Image (cartoon, rainbow, N blue to C red):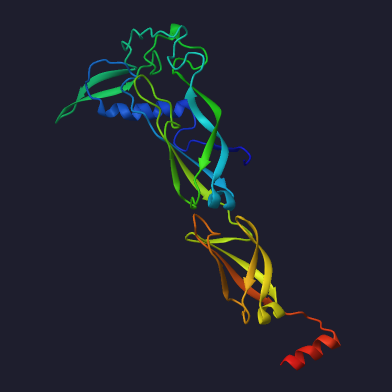
C-alpha cells in the first residue's frame, strides 16, 4: 500500500464556501413557501485529484487518501442543534432564507437572501450546535482507502459514489470525482496497453543470439534474443504489459570500448 496522499475538495474548502454556494442557489427559488432549508438543498458532487506511481496505475492497487473538506458534524450528527432536534428560527420559520418582493418599471420579482438571524441554518441560534454553529457541517480531514483499477490512465477520472459533500435531510451524499495523475517512470513507458523499455545487450549476443535478464512490471524475466538482432529492433514478450498487453524491449547493442589483442584477432577471423 502506498503512503497516505493528502488532497482537498476542489469546489469547496470550508463551510463558508458552502454557504456562499447555497446563497447562489436561492436566486431561482422565487416566492416558494417556507419548507425545511436543508431538505431542498441540492446535494453537490465534489472533485479532487491525486498523483500515483506508474506501476500502481498499470497494475492497480489500493491507496489511502486523506480528504480535507466539509464533513457531517459528529457532535450533532448533522442536525445542527445541540439536542438533535430542530428548533426553527422564528424569523425565517426554519427556511434559512428571507424573501422580499420588489419591482421595477417592467416587472415584479422576488429577492431571496440568507436569514441573518440563523445564518442560513434555519435553526434557532439558542439551540445551535457549538461545534458546527448550526450548519451540521464541520471542516476536517477523513482518511479513505481507494481501489485503483488496473490500467488507469493519466487524467482519467474515477467516480467514487457517496464520497462527495455530505447529504442533508433525505438526500444521500454526493459523489467524489477523483482525477488521477500518473507519475512518469524512469524505466517503463506506455503505449495503449503495451509497455516499452530499453534493453542493452552485448554485441556477441546480438550476433549469435542468447538469453538476457530483464525487468518487467510483473517481475524479472529471461528474454530470448534472436541472432542478428540490431539496435532499435523490438523484442516482444507476450502478456507482460497492462491488462494482457505486451512488453516490448527496444534493443541497444553495446560495443566494448577496449578489446584485448586476442579478442581483436577473433573478431578479424569472424569478419
Observer-nearest residue: 45 or 37? 45
Residue most extreme to the right: 261
Q: Residue at x 34, y 7 (%)?
A: 90
Decide: is 121 above or below 265: above
Q: Residue at x 26, y 29 (%)?
A: 28
Decide: is 115 above or below 45: above
Q: Residue at x 45, y 10 (%)?
A: 128
Q: Position of residue 14 (x, y in %)?
A: 49, 28
Q: Position of residue 34 (x, y in %)?
A: 26, 15
Left or right: residue 107 versus residue 234 is left
Left or right: residue 243 versus residue 251 is left
Q: Residue 112 sits in which quadrant?
A: top left
Quadrant of the frame with the N terminus: top right
How many dots with numbers?
0
Q: Position of residue 200 (x, y in %)?
A: 68, 71
Quadrant of the frame with the C terminus: bottom right
Q: Residue 80 sits in which quadrant?
A: top left
Left or right: residue 207 versus residue 128 is right
Q: Residue at x 47, y 8 (%)?
A: 82
Left or right: residue 171 versus residue 78 is left
Observer-nearest residue: 14 or 215? 215
Amino acid at each position: 500500500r502506498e503512503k497516505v496522499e493528502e488532497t482537498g475538495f476542489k469546489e469547496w474548502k470550508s463551510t463558508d464556501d458552502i454557504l456562499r454556494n447555497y446563497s447562489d442557489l436561492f436566486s431561482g427559488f422565487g416566492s416558494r413557501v417556507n419548507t425545511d432549508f436543508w431538505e431542498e438543498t441540492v446535494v453537490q458532487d465534489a472533485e479532487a485529484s491525486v498523483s500515483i506511481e506508474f506501476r500502481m496505475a498499470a497494475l492497480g492497487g489500493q491507496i489511502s487518501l486523506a480528504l480535507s473538506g466539509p464533513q457531517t458534524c459528529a457532535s450533532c450528527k448533522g442536525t445542527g442543534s445541540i439536542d438533535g432536534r430542530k428548533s426553527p428560527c422564528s424569523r425565517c420559520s426554519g427556511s434559512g432564507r428571507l424573501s422580499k418582493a420588489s419591482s421595477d418599471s417592467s416587472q415584479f420579482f422576488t429577492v431571496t437572501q440568507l436569514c441573518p438571524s440563523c445564518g442560513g441554518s434555519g435553526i434557532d441560534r439558542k439551540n445551535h450546535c457549538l461545534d458546527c454553529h448550526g450548519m451540521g457541517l464541520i471542516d476536517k480531514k477523513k482518511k479513505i482507502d481507494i481501489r485503483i483499477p488496473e490500467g488507469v490512465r493519466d487524467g482519467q477520472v474515477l467516480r467514487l459514489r457517496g464520497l462527495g459533500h455530505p447529504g442533508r435531510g433525505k438526500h444521500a451524499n454526493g459523489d467524489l470525482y477523483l482525477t488521477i495523475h500518473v507519475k512518469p517512470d524512469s524505466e517503463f513507458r506506455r503505449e495503449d496497453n503495451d509497455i516499452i523499455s530499453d534493453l542493452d545487450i552485448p554485441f556477441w549476443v546480438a550476433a549469435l543470439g542468447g538469453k538476457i535478464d530483464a525487468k518487467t512490471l510483473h517481475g524479472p524475466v529471461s528474454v530470448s534474443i534472436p541472432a542478428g538482432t540490431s539496435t532499435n529492433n523490438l523484442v516482444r514478450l507476450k502478456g507482460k504489459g497492462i491488462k494482457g498487453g505486451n512488453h516490448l524491449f527496444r534493443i541497444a547493442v553495446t560495443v566494448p570500448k577496449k578489446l584485448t589483442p586476442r579478442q581483436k584477432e577473433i573478431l578479424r577471423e569472424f569478419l
